Each structure stands twice: as structure tokens, then as C-alpha cells.
Image (tube, rainbow, N blue to C red):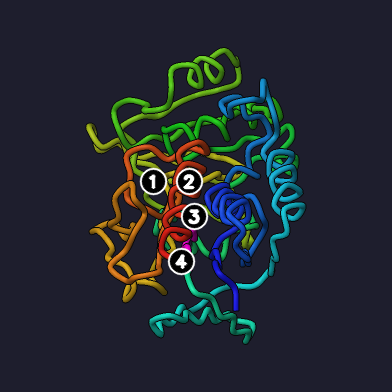
Amino acid sequence: MYDIIIVGGGPAGMTAALYGLRNGKSVLVIEKAGFGGQITYSPRVENIPGFQVVSGNEFADKFMEQILGQGADVELEEVCEVIDEGDKKIVKTVEGSAFESRTVIIAAGVKHRMLGLEGENELVGEGISFCAVCDGDFYKGKTVCVAGGGNSAFVEAVLLADKCSEVIMLQDLSDFTADKKLQEDFFKHDNVKTHTDTKILSLVTDKGSLTGVEIQNKLTGEKQIVNCDGLFVAIGLIPQNEPYEKLADLNSYGYFDSTEDCTTKTPGIFVAGDCRSKKVRQVTTACADGARAALAACDFLR
């Protein structure tokens, strides 16, 4: 039986592992996809203390090396249920494994929000993407649209503007909400266009591949087809907390309704990172959550 099992191997989960290990606890980290979380999609990160610039993958690799060196166990499986039996917690996975622990820290992270359009799911990987780092090279010299107007959308758009012949931003609000520096980096390119107050009505396809999007101006009602080879969707994230809603209260948006102490209504269950209700979601705040949750778990164990 472990002292601490951590669900999720992003910055919050790996920080929690580090702090648990440094306090002499046995720790297992279970991650369903790839260690590092959302940060691995960023080719250039400049706001992590101690790094002038670092890629998300490099940061994740260094973090992984650190916790393994401290003695963490890791499993690449998808957690589907956490059962509370008082002094013992049982963590079950889709693959059929069951791990026992005295405490659990849920740092499950978030997933990409979809547009909700007909045929959208079928086009993922066939014209619809979420990660410019992963898929940007497929669109070299081509035209792409980016749905969104916040930091995530502009990070994708800046990278795409260096590869594509044209990048078209589609924002449903009147203004862009991304940081000023990101907007400046985007608008210095001469191959970019924008549409604000814009609703994406439908996806245009030909033989199963995306060829454009139909949009409508929300102020004038005017509709038009924007031809493009790809659509990158960056309109927000959704917490992946449904399997744990009996253990920890969720707010109306599906985030864990926990304060900075990272505790829940279930003794021995803690939450950390982007899946928790908070105003700011950055690598630094995720790491802070991980540290706080791990220290709370250690106090609980004592």
C-alpha cells in the first residue's frame, strides 16, 4: 500500500510527488496519456521561474527525471474510479489495475473544449487539430483558421503564422483577451487576418476532409464561407473530474470546489492543479497546488 497515489502526471501531480517523496512517503503517479500535461504542447515557455526559455517537453522531461530520481513509482494507465474505504483508498484503472493507498491527490487536469458542430469529432485529425506543435507541420504553406481569442489561441496562432501561408483568427467576442505581448507577436506577421464577433456555424467538407468553415457576424448577421485547410480549436478547457464527483464537490463549471488548501469533503482525498476552481491557471499555480496538496496529505498521514 502506498502512502500517496497521485492521479495525473502534469506539473501539479509531479510537484505533489516531489513534495511527498521529500517527506519520506511512498508515492505512485498514474498518468493516462503523457507525463507533463498541457505544458508539453508549448514549444517555447518563458514564464517558468529559473528558465529564460524552455520547451514544454524539456521541462516535463526534467521534472520526470527528478521525481524518478527521488523514488517515485509511475504507471501509464487511465484512472476510472477512486473508492474511499476510510483508512484505505482503492484507485482503479480502465486497464483493470487496482492500487491501494492511504491518501489520494487528484490532479486530473483538463481537456480541450469542442465547438459542438455536426461532424466535428469525425474531423479531428482530418482537418481539426488542437496542437500546433503536434500538427502544424502538416499545414506548411497552407491556410488555417484558429477558433478562439485567448492566450491559448494566440500561442497556437503565432506558431502557425511562422509555418502557414495564412492564419485567420475567429473570435466570438468583440475583442481578443490574450496578453498584449502575445497579440503583438501575432499581429507583426503579414499573413494573418481576424474576424471578431464571429460565430462558427458549420464545417465545410469535401470527401471527408475539411475545406472551410461557415461563419456569421453576430452584429450584422452576414454569413460567409472561409476557405481553409485546417482548423485549430482553442476555445477553452474542460475539467476531467466526473469520476470523482462523489468524493469532492464540483462547481457549476465542473471544477473541484476546493479552496487553496486543496482539501475535499472526503478525508484523505486532495485535489490540485487546473482541475481545481481557481482564477489563474498557470504552471506556477499548478505547482503551488501540488506542493500544498502533498503537504496536506503528509499532515493527514501524521
From the image, which quarter does the N terminus lie in?
A: bottom right
Q: Is residue 19 left or right of residue 253?
A: right
- What amino acid type should be assigned to the residue bearing mark 4? Leu
Q: Across the whole image, how many numbered discs are drawn on residues? A: 4
The quadrant holding residue 302 is bottom left
Q: Which residue is mark 2?
A: 213
Looking at the image, is mark 4 or mark 1 earlier in the sequence?
Answer: 1
Image vertical order of residue 248 relative to residue 49, above or below:
below
Looking at the image, is mark 4 or mark 3 earlier in the sequence?
Answer: 3
Image vertical order of residue 245 relative to residue 225, above or below:
below
Label 1–label 2 contact, CB within 8 A: yes
- What amino acid type should be assigned to the residue bearing mark 2? Val
- What amino acid type should be assigned to the residue bearing mark 3? Ala
Q: Residue 208: where, in percent of width, then height?
A: 62, 62
Q: Is residue 94 left or right of residue 164?
A: left
Q: Which residue is mark 4?
A: 301
Q: Which residue is mark 1?
A: 200
